[in-house]
Amino acid sequence: MDTILNLGLNDETVLALVKATHNERFAWDCYRRFIQMYGDVVMGVQKRPNEDHEPFEVVIHTLKHDRHHADIEDTKMTVADLKELVNRFKALIKEHTGSEFPQNPWKQLWGAVGAVFGSWMNDRAMVYRRKYGIPSEWGTAVNVQAMVYGNTGDKSGSGVAFTRDPATGEKVFYGEFLINAQGEDVVAGVRTPEPVAQLKNHLPEAFAELETVRKTLESHFKDVQDFEFTIQDGKLFMLQTRNGKRTGLAAVRFAIEMEKEKLIDWKTAIRRVPADQLDQVLAPIFDRQAVKAAKCIARGLPAGPGAASGKMYLNADRAAAAAAKGEKVLLVRNETSPEDLRGMIAAEGILTAKGGVSSHAALVARQMGKVCVCGASALQIDYNAKTMTVDGSSYNEGDFLSISGTVGEVYPGEIKTAAAEIVQVLVEKSLDGKESATYQMFKKLMDWCSKVTRLQVRTNADTPEQTANAVAFGATGIGLCRTEHMFFEGNRIDAMREMILADNVEDRKKALALILPYQKQDFIGIFKELKGLPATIRFLDPPLHEFLPHEDAAQQDLAKKMGVPVAKIKQRVKELHEFNPMLGFRGCRLGIVYSEISEMQSRAIFEAAAEVQKAGIKVKPEVMIPLVGFKRELDLQVEVVHRVAKEVMAEKKVKLDYMVGTMIEVPRGALTADEIAQTAQFFSFGTNDLTQTCLGMSRDDSGSFLPPYTELEIVKRNPFATIDQVGVGQLMKMAVEKGRSTRPDIKLGICGEHGGDPDSVKFCHRIGLTYVSCSPFRVPVARLAAAQAALEQEAAKAAKPSKKK
Amino acid sequence: MDTILNLGLNDETVLALVKATHNERFAWDCYRRFIQMYGDVVMGVQKRPNEDHEPFEVVIHTLKHDRHHADIEDTKMTVADLKELVNRFKALIKEHTGSEFPQNPWKQLWGAVGAVFGSWMNDRAMVYRRKYGIPSEWGTAVNVQAMVYGNTGDKSGSGVAFTRDPATGEKVFYGEFLINAQGEDVVAGVRTPEPVAQLKNHLPEAFAELETVRKTLESHFKDVQDFEFTIQDGKLFMLQTRNGKRTGLAAVRFAIEMEKEKLIDWKTAIRRVPADQLDQVLAPIFDRQAVKAAKCIARGLPAGPGAASGKMYLNADRAAAAAAKGEKVLLVRNETSPEDLRGMIAAEGILTAKGGVSSHAALVARQMGKVCVCGASALQIDYNAKTMTVDGSSYNEGDFLSISGTVGEVYPGEIKTAAAEIVQVLVEKSLDGKESATYQMFKKLMDWCSKVTRLQVRTNADTPEQTANAVAFGATGIGLCRTEHMFFEGNRIDAMREMILADNVEDRKKALALILPYQKQDFIGIFKELKGLPATIRFLDPPLHEFLPHEDAAQQDLAKKMGVPVAKIKQRVKELHEFNPMLGFRGCRLGIVYSEISEMQSRAIFEAAAEVQKAGIKVKPEVMIPLVGFKRELDLQVEVVHRVAKEVMAEKKVKLDYMVGTMIEVPRGALTADEIAQTAQFFSFGTNDLTQTCLGMSRDDSGSFLPPYTELEIVKRNPFATIDQVGVGQLMKMAVEKGRSTRPDIKLGICGEHGGDPDSVKFCHRIGLTYVSCSPFRVPVARLAAAQAALEQEAAKAAKPSKKK
């Protein structure tokens, strides 16, 4: 928002200021500064369309050249220069606005007050408010206060500083200052400021006082402060202070070290780390120097945090082939689909030209902890030519690219990266935890969280590897094991396609029998990694057409491979085409129409469970039926599950401890949760689809209207990132109440992408869910948010007067 | 369900029956009948896969040829024949089942009882229950009763009859009988029965008694009866009676004439006509003789009642062109889309190979009162070859076809049709009402309805013509005027496409300015036809890609016409492509992102209203914003409407009486109805989309799983035809309550296709809506259902003891 300094000066008062301060240069410097700022902010003197530079800067530049034939520093301008500047500025204002610069201080004041109020609605302020979720209707106040001056001479200066380093978290005095300058000069970059520690050499007394203030501020506010100061003729003035913005890493270090310093207690330390920033400490990082030198060629949405470099490939198969040859690859697509999975697995990072932060690419990337930039709309991808064009420059498949999923930037060429320390300790196990200071801090924070958390954190994991990672990050089980990914790998996709092309139930069963051993092995691997923790396994969910190839060449290949006419494949693809596949033949609808699929999946789960249990490891499968809207859908599927479980237990002579439940992901499921809970032993909210259906808004298609919707404040937050508590949340609360009304001990969880979003996690805590589930690398974020939710509730209870005496 | 006659006979009791009746032939005839029925129903002797005829029939046939060298009538078989038949039947049973035909009567009885119970779950019973909405869990009872015999000789016989003609409604004795036969023979068609009036000639006394019974039954049951009788040795026995099934026409005539006869009062008459059959009396009809001679080549869903003949065309443009030349055409497509609209308007009837009773084809057909058969899956359509193949036979474009949308049948060639009498009176005005008996009855029924109805019936109409028809049928206004159809006709589609292809708001406004006068003219026409009745007008709703051509040739044409490169059109089509268009960039999202569209539409509405009002006709526009899920969406659109209304009223110096409201068609709209009602002056439930989103079920894609869902009784009724009261209905009730909580006088309606479904209309009455809205030809159906709902509520109140003294 706007501010106006040096207000009150005019042709008369400037002379008085000269007389009062005996500092003619200072007075005229203030006057010219005031006219420039007032002319810009209040009177609206702006660059014209055909101009390259700010008009006031042009006047300064011209004057310097007229009188000194060079670009001298502002501080070197003489009194005569400054007086001339005042005249030229006045003329500029008159020329641009047709009005005179006002001499009346009251008129100046009202003009400035109006401009500051008006700046509440300027672009910068609106963008800032959107980013930090501040509603426009709050409005603003205007402060009017006396000035202190950093521009009276060499005993004066201005600076901005942090009590600690907000990037690394280190406990050092961090900031910068300028001698003989007003605060604006430090920020504006007219002169290059010096690090704040250098102030000691210029004004040692003021610096000593500032050091004291630094400590006072932290001991008073119990948090790192970001403050502005001015030194006027050797005397220190503090202009403002506020809690300092910080990186995730710094936030953790501040919290841990301040607790050690007894500035805050451990519960405050938990609340002090912004949960959504915690995953920054887990993300791979670019080499600092290398990325500074690189040029950003396109921007997209930061969809999977971290940094990745590799050769770009525009096709999943070619990407996978290149990776198999040992190349580091980036998969670059307009958008991704499950057919691209192999390529996504193989890639260091994923870059898409279309789609939002919860597009398929983003979803899978986060699930796998992959770096991802999506919706980089400047990219023009030509699949045929195998090129990507940005802003006139063309890149060929095989060229190196680098992307930062933390900031959403794309760079040409290779930039060196490294895994985060914590990941090196927990996942790569390449670093001893004791050697890593960051890991030690992270571990302490997570241990504190465990002491207060009620809401459990599970993970969405489809493979033993993902499971192991999530458990290492502290997940207490799997909340969503998507089985569809198990149909894609290697030969299985062939059997799956055979199943889909089958004309009758016998042929379908034959094809399914080929898939069974693979699925069983997958489950065995997952159960072993879980070591007794529960696993919620979802039956096949996506529409079948996703498993068939849609391009002619791939269809020809498949026909040859399977020995069927290609027309048959085309026919089936056509039959399976849907207008709105999200609302089509998917979820439990598949298992109901083709119950042999559910039978096979049940058998794979229970045979795997029996085998692992016999090896002495406890197994807790929780079979989850997707997309249920009618109790009878669940009844029919549960019947299959129980029947197969009974069969397997008899065959293998083992007793298995399992549950059957459902996802609540269409509104009708929530509305009839009391009926459904008569059969379901647990609910898991599929908030991705529940959001899509409740809002009537397709996640993949919302890119065309969600941005204007955000600007117009129709939605405050992206509903696919943070639960829409008023709408979707209302359905969830309803389902919780209704579910408990017929099954008081029902287990309740959430397995949508929202499970890794801090605000959504807190909402889940408040409505009384048992657990949230999120992708492995989001587990720490969710654990932190869950702990914060518990603390917030504790605080809220303490604030309310107890009803009992 | 199954029945077993003549039970108790065996080798011993048959002799006793001979002795008791002195009628050897009769006794052996009963015995052979019993063995055949028991063998078939209880012991399961069925045709083998390689056999063409029923095994018992084969035995009878063989025996006749062995002994008489001819196919004599059953009644001509001698005692010796019958005895031999008994032996051969026993052998057949032994051969087929490996078991002996049981001689013990108790064993026979228990076998029969078991079979009847079992038949509750046979295919026929299940299909019947589905059709008439009878839940399986009701189960059945088994009646065991003494026999009377119609096969003792020429003084005996059996028959089935109606007290009046159930096809035409005429008060004549209607039915058929057979002398010397059991009831099964009449139904089975072994011999050709005689009309019941002929019984007078055979058995005049029995006939006279039957005539008396006919009158007694009607005066007792106060309704037309469908009964079975048997005459044993001249004595009449009544076997069963029940209310007779009837056609729509008969139902109306019964009700009207019985009221005249004082058998029932007028309120009972209203309740007596099944509302969903009323539109049968409005549908065009085939010439009776012609259709009898025709061969049905394919069956589909009866989606738009009536009969139509015309030359088949596989493409909308060619169909329209042919119709313009004066041909009668049928539009035949795999499925239809808004691009086909011109062809649908031009066609006599619409036939599709895919899609259900609420597919686009069906929806538009009913809206326009067009005959429609959809989902005739036997049709193989080859657009390139311009042929349709059915079961090996090929039909070329231009060949005549006929379809019955009442029964869902397709015939080759032309069959003569005529408009229903009522339509001739009210719409075609080609028949004086006084000349038409059917119209007189219809009018009386509708007049009665008006006396009790609380719920108003409006219509979904997009043109002056549809409006006029609906008003003639008694609509009290327009509940849904879809403006998108107004963008398709003639040149307007060009301007619309220009708008969509525009790169900036100025070009969009220019293109919209071209559409404005057309829309305005449409509204003027509609307002004039309404003569002061209210019109709810919905802003543009469908996704923009529906307005662009998707085929290469059409894109080339458009490019040439508009003078833009075809690549630009292809690019825009690609940009507008959506994964789930139902949940995409449509509804108010269009009007919010491109507010100039809403401005143009507002202006067209208000300028039209001003003009018509100045001409002395009262106008009540109700502007409806579609797909609202957030109050602020509505706020933003309402702002545009009010602004434009104010402008137009100032320009035209006129005061307009208008309202602004919203559709409730996504769950979030219902869940936040209290907020939305702060802005909305009315709600209209868009139950099509509300069903799709609440159930997570795409109407157009549900064809793959709704049929098995119905069989498995997951859904009792097609939720796109009849409101899912438990799920969607719950959201509606919630929205009604919440809406009234912040705006007690809010006007509430429904404009989904459900507005024409009697059960849904009754539900709307119960939850307190102000009106329902349906397609013009469904208005009488909805009026009848609304009256019945009022009477049902009256009856329910009367049944409850009053709380006041």
Image (spheres, coloured by chain):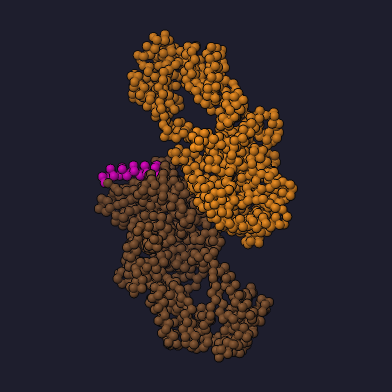
Chain colours: A brown, B orange
Using the image as rendered, state which of residue A675 and residue A654 is in the foreground.
A675
The residue shown at (55%, 17%) is: B211
A377 or B13: nearer the viewer? B13
Seen from the viewer's position, the closer of residues B98 and A288 is A288
Quick check: is B603 in the magenta stretch?
A: no
Q: Position of residue A721 (x, y in %)?
A: 46, 59
Q: Position of residue A663 (x, y in %)?
A: 41, 50
Q: Taken as a whole, is the magenta stretch helix, strand or loop? A: helix
Residue positioned 63% across, 62% down in the render: B504
Image-based side of B520 in relation to A454, left or right: right
Q: Is residue A484 above or below residue B440?
A: below
Tell me: residue B733, above or below residue A349: above
Residue A748 shows in the view: yes
Residue at the spot 45% in from the left edge and 31% down from the top edge: B125
- The answer to whether one can see residue B332 in this image is no
Q: Give left or right: position of A269 versus B407.
A: left
Residue at x 65% of width, y 54% of height: B602
Q: Is residue A639 magenta?
A: yes
Q: Which quarter of the rendering shows the N terminus of chain A?
A: bottom right
Quarter holding the C terminus of chain A is bottom left
Closer to the camera in the image, A68 or A741: A741
| Extreme residue toward the front, this view | B805
Q: Magenta segment, which residues?
A: A634-654
Q: Using the image, determine if residue B581 lies above or below residue A133.
A: above
Q: Is residue B722 above or below residue A320?
A: above
- Residue A623 rendering spot, x and y as whole percentages: 36, 49
Measured as percent of width and height from the top left, residue B736 is found at 53, 47
